[in-house]
Image (tube, rainbow, N blue to C red):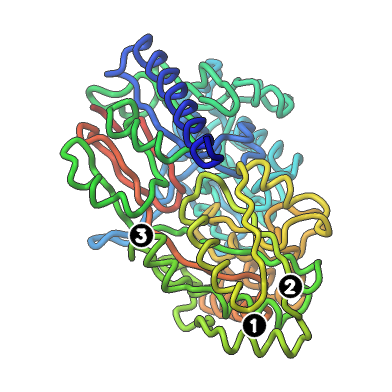
């Protein structure tokens, strides 16, 4: 048996075993009341203070924030709607926000939602300082004048109603958990107000959530009683599960399979614009990528149109830089490069880069489009005498490598980014603002001029949106000029769901999250 056949046989064995495991669990529980997601990545952190990855899909069904972002439609503009807060007011100077909380809400431990619970949640999140805690940076103090009234005093004007709608770090959790360590949450315990609570957590395999009795919100007729997140990194298995009815929802299937899936009467293929951009972050700490012209040459060698055609079957669009279309601060006229191998060759020659250069590109094993992008880019770079070594990795392993010593890390870190909350600051701060310790700036880019523009724009976001937007655009153009990253494409949200599921609506502000309480079969 040759190596290829051996690997194929081994993969099919794993697929069959995983499918059987899932089916046995579903049969034991009863499938009609279970909503099963074949989720392509695992959940590295279930602490609501520090979660900043795909675990948001779980937490969004367990926890809630004060508000929720509702995207624009053909008939209505984007808006912020009440969630745990029923209303809010802001002072004339934009620095004091008063939220009135919803009465009668209880945490999963039975304690009531109060202003003290809100204050304690946000103060714990700020104190730990991990994940997306930066969103609360402008909050100087939190006051609790009444049990259902909480007042935020800011150091500078900020759109706190929008910040409070964030998909990370904005969760409110029970006071009984405010002194808990991350290990308590990551053992499968929770302290939310959401419609579901975590009942079973097997890291790397599944998370099972059960409905909470007495949930404060509206529950549809025929609502699901259980959510099963089955971690399925193999796209073939995920497609098999959704087609056979073993799963109700999935994403990240190969684009070339979508037409066949659309013709299946048992499935709905939901395609909507997203806020997701595919980046390749250049490691500017390692030679020769520490030279701007070398990075520019690599970007000129990228086959943008071919990747969109082959990787997304034409569904994707050219990325115009850091901030995708649909978010204020998007630069529709950004000076993005086009594929030009001759120009790339000339830049490499200017920098004295000889044939034989080897670069390592890491990407997630669950993202077929990232693999396609790597293969096509590799072919172009070979014509320039550059070998691109493609290194697929589980997301957690890739992220940990990127956060390690930059000198020993990857040359190019490929990943998707979607917003913590809907602002250009989220993209620019996380991916390109200087960091003492790497978190998501995994190209290790640092430019004081760019930092200053990002920081000033953030301060102006609540009082002078046009000036803030102009500064965000200036920062983006400097990042493009510095070739800090390659902006590969903007992809649509493509989710495949069973046709008998009712109530599904995609919200690009919350990447690949199904709010299961809204659904029924």
Residue for badge 2: 356
Q: Which mark is residue 481?
A: 1
Residue at (38, 58) in percent of width and height: 492
Q: Is residue 464 left or right of residue 86?
A: right
Q: Quadrant of residue 297?
A: bottom right
The answer to whether the residues at label 3 and label 2 have Cβ atoms under 8 Å apart is no
Query: In terms of depth relative to the viewer, which is nearer, 180 or 81?
Result: 180
Q: Position of residue 174 (x, y in %)?
A: 60, 25
Vertical relation: 149 (above or below) 425: above
Q: Which mark is residue 238?
A: none
How far apart in space, not on screen, are marks 1 and 3 (Cα)?
27 Å
Q: Residues within 10 Å of mark 2 (few under 14, many from 20)?
A: few
Of the two numbered discs 2 and 1 on the same chain, state the one appearing first in sequence.
2
Residue at (49, 38) in percent of width and height: 5
Choose mark 3 or mark 2, whichever is in front: 2
Query: In terms of depth relative to the viewer, which is nearer, 388 or 462?
Result: 388
Quadrant location, the C terminus: top left
């Amino acid at each position: 048996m040759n190596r290829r056949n051996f690997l194929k046989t081994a993969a099919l064995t794993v697929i069959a075993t995983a499918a059987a495991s899932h089916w046995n669990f579903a049969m034991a529980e009863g499938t009609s009341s279970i909503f099963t997601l074949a989720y392509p990545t695992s959940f590295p952190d279930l602490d609501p203070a520090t979660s900043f990855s795909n675990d948001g899909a779980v937490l969004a069904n367990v926890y809630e924030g004060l508000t929720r972002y509702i995207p624009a439609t053909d008939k209505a503009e984007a808006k912020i709607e009440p969630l745990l807060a029923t209303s809010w007011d802001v002072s004339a100077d934009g620095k004091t926000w008063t939220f009135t909380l919803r009465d009668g809400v209880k945490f999963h431990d039975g304690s009531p939602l109060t202003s003290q619970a809100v204050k304690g949640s946000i103060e714990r999140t700020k104190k730990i300082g991990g994940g997306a805690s930066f969103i609360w940076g402008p909050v100087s103090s939190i006051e609790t004048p009444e049990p259902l009234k909480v007042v935020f005093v800011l150091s500078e004007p900020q759109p706190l109603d929008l910040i409070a709608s964030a998909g990370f770090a904005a969760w409110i959790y029970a006071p009984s958990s405010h002194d808990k360590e991350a290990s308590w949450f990551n053992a499968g315990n929770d302290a939310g107000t959401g419609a579901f609570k975590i009942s079973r957590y097997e890291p790397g395999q599944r998370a099972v959530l059960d409905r909470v009795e007495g949930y404060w919100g509206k529950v549809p007729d025929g609502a699901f009683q259980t959510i099963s997140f089955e971690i399925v990194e193999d796209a073939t298995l995920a497609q098999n599960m959704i087609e056979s009815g073993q799963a109700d929802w999935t994403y990240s299937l190969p684009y070339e399979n979508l037409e066949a899936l659309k013709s299946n009467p048992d499935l709905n293929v939901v395609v909507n614009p997203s806020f997701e951009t595919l980046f390749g972050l250049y490691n500017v700490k390692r030679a020769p990528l520490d030279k701007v012209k070398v990075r520019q040459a690599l970007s000129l060698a990228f086959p943008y149109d071919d990747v969109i055609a082959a990787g997304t079957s034409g569904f994707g669009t050219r990325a115009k830089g850091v901030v995708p279309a649909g978010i204020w601060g998007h630069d529709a006229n950004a000076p993005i490069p086009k594929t030009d191998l001759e120009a790339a060759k000339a830049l490499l020659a200017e920098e004295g880069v000889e044939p034989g250069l080897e670069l390592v590109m890491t990407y997630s094993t669950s993202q077929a489009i990232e693999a396609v992008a790597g293969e096509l880019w590799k072919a172009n770079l070979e014509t320039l005498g550059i070998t691109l070594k493609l290194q697929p990795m589980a997301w957690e392993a890739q992220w940990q490598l990127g956060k390690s010593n930059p000198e020993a890390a990857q040359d190019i870190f490929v990943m998707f980014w979607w917003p913590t909350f809907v602002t250009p600051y989220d993209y620019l701060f996380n991916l390109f603002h200087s960091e003492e310790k790497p978190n998501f700036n995994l190209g290790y880019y640092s430019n004081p001029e760019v930092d200053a523009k990002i920081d000033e724009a953030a301060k102006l976001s609540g009082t002078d949106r046009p000036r803030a937007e102009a500064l965000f655009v200036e920062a983006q153009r400097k990042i493009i000029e510095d070739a800090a990253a390659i902006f590969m494409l903007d992809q649509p949200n493509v989710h495949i769901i069973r046709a008998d599921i009712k109530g599904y609506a995609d919200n690009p502000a919350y990447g690949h999250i199904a709010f299961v309480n809204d659904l029924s079969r």
